[in-house]
Each structure stands twice: as structure tokens, then as C-alpha cells.
Amino acid sequence: MIKVIISGYGKMGHMIEKELQRKGISLVEASEDITATDPAVAKECVCIDFTTPDAFRANYPFIAKHFKAAVIGTTGWNDIKDKVLAAFREAGTPMIYASNFSLGVNALFKALQKACELLKDAGYTPEIEEIHHIHKLDAPSGTAKTMAELVEQYLGETTEINSIREGEVPGIHTLTLTSACDKLTLRHEAFSREGFAKGAVVAALMTEGLQGCHMFGELL
């Protein structure tokens, strides 16, 4: 059975800890500063990272160099994606990353892809809206950016993202495809962060025997 160290011990870190306990998976530690981890200990562990964009940018070289494997749930680093993936590949450290580890959101991605394939060149205009709690640091969300990338790839259309921050909303993502004849709406609403934690632990288990860097949705 794998051993895990959590990088970032905020609300998500606590959720992941509870999910690890439910699965009977060993949590070695939960750290606010992952670079303080003993490299000898790190080499035996999977790092599950849910920190901030700035923290991940500072920490990813250490994670890539010292950990057995990594699951990266932090978003907001797409502009350095090539550097990050290169660091993990050069270190030979398997890494699974996602803009959203919810199984439901990854089902949304697949449904979005299929809908866009079917409606390409049929006169549909896409719109994306995402709503999150007021504490979320990045806007648009990484999930919404992934949706926009899929729309561009499979529908052949670019779309703006409307980002709303209100209350304590865990996350709502909506794609509408509108034509002169009708409208199709695809929507995912998270009730809590629990779904993200469940998916991250599923991903951590997937790292056993894995090589290379992979998006979570590709492995499901």
C-alpha cells in the first residue's frame, strides 16, 4: 500500500486526510512547507499537492526530485506547464495532474467533448460560466480553462469565461451551446470539496507502477 505526504494542509488537505483514513492509506505527514520534508522519507511517498499557485511554482522542483510520485491538484501554473512536466520527466518521477480531480467533472469533460464533436460546424455559440467561493485565488478556474480548451479543440470555437466569486460555493461549471434553434446546457455542481479529495486519492493509487506525466482524465 502506498504512503502519502500532503503538501498544503488547508481545507483540501484535511479532506484528503479523511479520505486516506477511510481507505486505510498511511499518511506520513501533512506539511505546510513540503521542501522541509526529509528526502529519504519523501522517496518512499506519494506527494498530494493542493497548495497555491505561488507555492507550487516554488516547490515543484523539490517534489519532482525527491518524491516517489506526485498528484498535483493545484492550478494556476499552466504558463509554466512545459517546465513542470520536463522537471518530473527528467527526474523519472511519475506525476498525475488535473484542473479538477472530481470524477463528476471528468465525466463533464467527456460529455463536453462528445457534444462539441457532434455539433461542430452546426452554428452553435459556446459560453462558459464558473462560480466559486470568495477565497479562490485564481480566476478563471483551472476547470473552466480546461473546458474552454476542449471547446476550442472539438467545436473549433473560442469562448470567453465568465467568473463569479460569491459566498462559500465549492464550484459550479456550466457550458451552454446556443444556436438559432435550441440551447444545450452541460453543468456540474460540487456540493463540497469531498469529491476532489476522493479523486485525488484515486489518482495517488494510480501512481503505483506508473511512468511519465498524465492528466487524470486520460487515466480514468
Image (tube, rainbow, N blue to C red):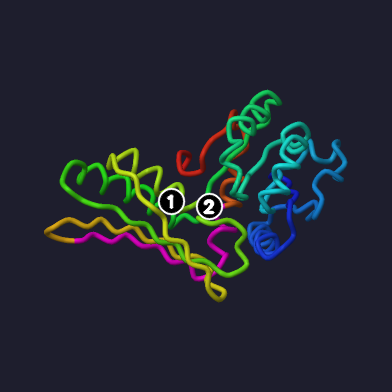
Q: Would you say 38 lies left or right of 93 here?
A: right
Q: Nearer the viewer, residue 118 or 126?
A: 126
- Is residue 108 covered in magenta? no
Q: Which mark is residue 101?
A: 2
Which stretch is magenta?
A: 183-199
Q: Would you say 32 lies left or right of 186 here?
A: right
Q: Which residue is mark 1?
A: 106
Query: Judging from the image, what secondary structure is the residue with disc 2 in?
Result: loop
Reply above or below: 18 against 74. Answer: below
Residue shown at 71% from the left, 39% from the top? 60
Q: CA distance from mark 1 to mark 2?
A: 7 Å
Residue shown at 59% from the left, 48% from the top? 76
Q: Position of residue 196 (x, y in %)?
A: 56, 58
Count of residue discs = 2
Q: Position of residue 44 (x, y in %)?
A: 78, 38
Q: Position of residue 219 (x, y in %)?
A: 48, 39
Q: Nearer the viewer, residue 21 or 160?
A: 160
